[in-house]
Image: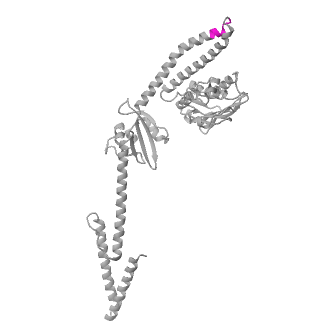
Amino acid sequence: MSAAWSFAIARLLGVVAVAAVAGFLLGHVQLTILVVLAGYLALVFTRLFRLERWLRRRRTESPPDLPNVWGDIVALIMRIYRRKQFHKRRIVQLFREFRRMTSAMPDGVVVLGPDRDILWFNRNAGRLLRLRRKVDFGQRLDNLIRDPDFVRYVEQGDYSIPIVMRSTSDADVHLSLQMVAYGAQQLLLVRDVTRQVRLEAMRKDFVAHASHELRSPLTVITGYVDTLADDPSVDQLWRGPLQEMRRQTERMRAVVDGLIELSRLESASGEAGQDVVDVSGMLTLIRREALALERRPAEITLRLDTDAKLLGSEPELHSIFANLVSNAVKYTPPEGRVDIRWRLDGEAAVLTVSDTGVGIAPEHIPRLTERFYRVDPSRARATGGSGLGLAIVKHALQRHGATLQVESREGLGSTFTCRFPARRVVARAPTAVNL
């Protein structure tokens, strides 16, 4: 208990004692004490009224000069008020700094509430999204941006990758939008990526045109090289160089074909088709082709835990499966093993290709699906790899809404897992076939 309260209680007891003595002398003890307590209560109510009046008019009136514990209460209120004013000024200062910082950013920033209602946005966000201050505050963002792809992106909840879409006000402008969740609120980051999109389109067009232009002369060269290599009248000294020329032209043709396939996948809009594809039959054929190779592992097994089919593009699915099996066969020694498995995991369909080959170091795994990326260039040259297979797999899987997962340990082999969503699966009765 504070000294002020101890003094107030002692004074009250003293007043009651004096009133009792006075009442005894007057012959009316109870009445005297009652009158004194009533006066004391009136004094308390008077000071309480002054305190309440000051609290309501604190901004315009000075604090009342009250004694004892009442003065301590006024001082405590003033300290709390000054502390609140300090924090309020600090919050206002931080908010102003935040506004200045976001206004200086080249990107647009939109602050969203729990229901994706607009709480605030900076100048660049208003310019890029055609938002109006005060008018659009409180509006749901997906009511103002009605692009179906953006609505799906917002509702799916996975914001790790931004979405690129055309501006609703200018079809020539491309915007990158990414949601960032923090607590119950969200930030929408908006960036103008028109230049990057155009450069990427130019690159794709160049690769596609260059690949098509290279195909014709390469076909002619390959024809002449094959003719010379099979001609018995050619000097024996030229046999070795001609065979090497044949291998290199085959490698060049594989690169050109890969570039053409990759360009076709990149330029294709939307998702893959909805044709029913017999995955079990396709994998059986791919395994048979792998077994026919001259250089291959001792064992290539196929386990079919289901005969479920997929809805998609048959050429693209064949490209996915064939590239994965081909890579496993290429980088597995003759005494090794390649296992292919097709199964259901819940409502999703999963293809797994495992091998006991050379494996991949952890630092290379994130870049495996980049075009022309090779873990070991000398090894790729020895096996005839083009560096485009996994890039093709990645784009084809994206067109089917599927994902690729890579697990590998150097020297112990690798496992590539493709997971297809339930909407692409035509489920059948469970079965088990080992080949």
Kindly identify the residue that appears in the image at 32 percent across and 94 percent down: 25
Q: Decide if residue 256 is on the left or right side of residue 152.
A: right
In the picture provided, is 102 more to the left or to the right than 328?
left
The reply to whether residue 429 is in sight is no
On screen, 295 above or below 186? Answer: above
* Quadrant, the N terminus: bottom left
The front one of 277 and 204 is 204
Residue stretch in magenta: 226-232
Q: Choose between 418 and 263: the one closer to the eye.
A: 263
Question: Which SS type dominates the magenta stretch?
Answer: helix
- As rendered, which of 51 and 145 lies closer to the eye? 51
Relative depth, front residue between 60 and 232:
232
- Residue 204: where, in percent of width, then height? 48, 24
Q: Quadrant of residue 52?
A: bottom left
Magenta region includes residue 1: no
Could you tell me residue 64's position as x and y percent? 28, 71
**In the rendering, at what x and y percent does residue 326 appear?**
64, 26
